[in-house]
Amino acid sequence: MLSRTFLSDGNLAPVKGSRGWPDRYSRGEIGFTLLEVIIAVTILAVMAGIIFSVVLGSTSRSRALEDEMELRLTAGSILNLIAEDLKGAYIQPGSAPFFLGRDLFSRENPADGVDLVTTAALPVNPMTVAGDLAEVGYTLIHEADKEVGTLYRREHAPPEEPWDDGGESFEISEGVLSFNLRYFDGDNWNDEWDSQDQTRANMTGKIPDEIEIEITMEDESAAVTLRTVVSPPLSVKP
């Protein structure tokens, strides 16, 4: 016998398959309509795009930080090498004093040069004979088709006149955008220095009291600038 269910108002509840129920339920169909599937796929696509953007951004930032850190380590190593050479600046007794700092530019960026005799004696070339003194020079050279330049170190041991010539030059690093040096004479900062210039009493026969070194390196994804000041212990007139 077919049992019927009565509603609270006393009326009979509709039987499955009658007009009171959707046809797909009466046919036993269970699933999603095309519209529901389209909405679900759209939501998933949006969520996937958001997740991909977050992951990609995080990866890009991580790569940029790694590049900057590597650039900073390279710049720091170069700065330490230059600082050691300049801290060892020395004027040999009985010889013409020599410390030459040139104020130069390339593409409107500082590209200074410096030549000196130093007690640092840290040869870049392993074939160089180690000694107490060495001529050392630094030069930044830009190629015509590049925004950044290459820093070179000249070394000659033992030193001999002319102090700003001879020896061999070796590449220290590419990717150097600017190289700037300033020299303190006890009263003022100077953009250049010449210990053999008889017209400048603040420089004649002297080593700078302090030397400021600034180097900027740049690659495709990062740029760093490092700066330090050194005080040569022998910065007194012999």
Image (spheres, helix red, strand yellow):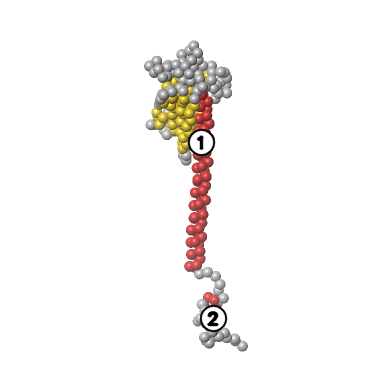
Image spot of residue 152 (x, y percent): 48, 26
Q: Which mark is residue 5?
A: none
Element carrying mark 2? loop
Is residue 91 shown above or below 216?
above
Q: Are marks 1 and 2 in contact (CB under 8 Å)?
A: no
* Mark closer to the chain start, 1 or 2: 2
Residue appearing at x 49%, y 11% in the figure: 94
Residue appearing at x 42%, y 19% in the figure: 203
Q: Which residue is mark 2?
A: 17
| Quarter residue 29 falls in | bottom right
Residue appearing at x 43%, y 23% in the figure: 186
Residue appearing at x 51%, y 16% in the figure: 159
Element carrying mark 1? helix
Give the amino acid type for the residue marked by disc 2 in the picture: Gly
Give the amino acid type for the residue marked by disc 1 in the picture: Arg
Quarter of the image containing the N terminus? bottom right
Q: Which residue is mark 1?
A: 72
Q: Nearer the viewer, residue 179 or 214?
A: 214
Of all residues, the one furthest to the front in this rendering is 187
Mark 1 surroundings within 10 Å by alpha-carbon count, few (fewer than 14), some (14 through 19), many (20 or more)? many
Is residue 42 shown above or below 216?
below
